[in-house]
């Protein structure tokens, strides 16, 4: 794997308790935690959730360099969310006014909460895809009832997103080293990006063709009945974690929906 692709590959191998959890349990954790986080608007609770997720990943041996890469990928989107929210939301006390734009305390608060919510949900997904290899992802989907071909397609899609992002970065660096200058306004930069996009698409199609030949050479789709060397088995610790997660999520969701817990900004 190239350096660029490695930088965008968020999976990290390990033998921690989080890595050894059944992938179905980790998927349930993602669904439960995301539901609760989407119900919350409280800045303190959302920030605390982000810190807790970081601690869990670090205690599981997940490398800080990959966490930093996720932050770098998210940061432009988070800044854009905070800056654009005052355009669509005007509640709260006015902080300052510049022509038709009015920035209020409520807009900044809700924008910050939305950015924290996006961050928290993104790192919750990292608990799953960052500690589960491709084979376990496929087996997890298949054991949940998806056909093997569907599970394989979904897993390939998840895994190739960072690969294609790495291809784009590699091609962009190569083109700029040959004299391509990416400067100017948005439209000028868009035109200058065309050679990068064309080369990236060619590389992506070549990678897809190689993947198709690899799957065909290994007999993918040759038989409807498949066997596995190591099938998934729910262990007692998996059931304990699954039960605790679902109970906690149900309690927090009930408190949020019927008692307003976490629904206010502060």
Image (cartoon, helix red, strand yellow):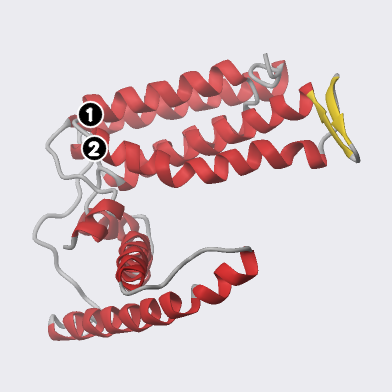
Residue neighbourhood size for the residue with mark 2, other residues' Cα within 10 Å, grouped as few (<14), some (14–19), many (≥20): many
Q: Judge whether 44 appears above or below 227 on screen.
A: above
Give how far across and how far down residue 130 sits, in percent. Answer: 29, 44
**Mark 2 falls on what kind of element?**
loop
| Outermost residue to the left | 229
Q: Are marks 2 and 1 in contact (CB under 8 Å)?
A: yes
User: Horizontally, is 265 left or right of 207 in the view?
Assistant: right
How many numbered markers are drawn?
Answer: 2
Residue beneath disc 1:
237
Q: Judge whether 122 appears above or below 178 on screen.
A: above
Quadrant, the N terminus = bottom left
Label ID, residue 20: none
Give how far across and how far down residue 215 sits, in percent. Answer: 20, 80
Give how far across and how far down residue 12 sits, in percent. Answer: 20, 45
Label ID, residue 21: 2
Task: Kindly tell me whether residue 265 is visible in this rendering.
Answer: yes
The residue drawn where x is 14% and y is 39% is: 14
Circle nearer the viewer, 2 or 1:
2
Task: Kindly tell me whether residue 125 is visible in this rendering.
Answer: no
Foreground: 170 or 187?
Answer: 187
Foreground: 259 or 147?
Answer: 259
User: Horizontally, is 18 left or right of 184 in the view?
Assistant: left
């Amino acid at each position: 794997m190239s350096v660029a692709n490695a930088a965008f590959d968020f999976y990290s191998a390990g033998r921690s308790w989080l890595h050894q959890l059944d992938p179905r349990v980790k998927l349930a954790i993602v669904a439960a935690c995301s539901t609760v986080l989407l119900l919350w608007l409280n800045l303190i609770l959302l920030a605390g959730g982000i810190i807790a997720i970081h601690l869990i990943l670090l205690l599981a041996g997940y490398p800080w360099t990959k966490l930093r890469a996720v932050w770098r990928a998210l940061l432009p989107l988070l800044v854009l969310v905070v800056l654009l929210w005052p355009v669509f939301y005007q509640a709260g006390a006015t902080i300052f006014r510049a022509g038709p734009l009015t920035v209020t305390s409520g807009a900044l608060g809700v924008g910050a909460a939305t950015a924290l919510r996006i961050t928290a949900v993104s790192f919750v997904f990292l608990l799953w895809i960052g500690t589960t290899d491709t084979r376990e992802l496929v087996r997890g989907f298949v054991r949940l009832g998806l056909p093997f071909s569907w599970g394989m397609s979904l897993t390939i899609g998840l895994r190739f997103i960072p690969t294609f992002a790495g291809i784009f970065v590699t091609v962009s660096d190569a083109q700029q080293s040959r004299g391509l200058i990416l400067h100017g306004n948005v439209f000028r930069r868009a035109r200058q990006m065309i050679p990068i996009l064309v080369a990236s698409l060619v590389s992506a199609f070549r990678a897809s063709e190689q993947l198709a030949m690899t799957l065909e050479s290994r007999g993918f789709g040759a038989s409807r009945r498949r066997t596995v060397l190591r099938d998934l088995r729910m262990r007692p610790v998996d059931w304990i974690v699954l039960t605790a997660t679902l109970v906690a999520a149900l309690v927090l969701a009930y408190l949020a929906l019927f008692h307003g817990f976490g629904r206010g900004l502060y």
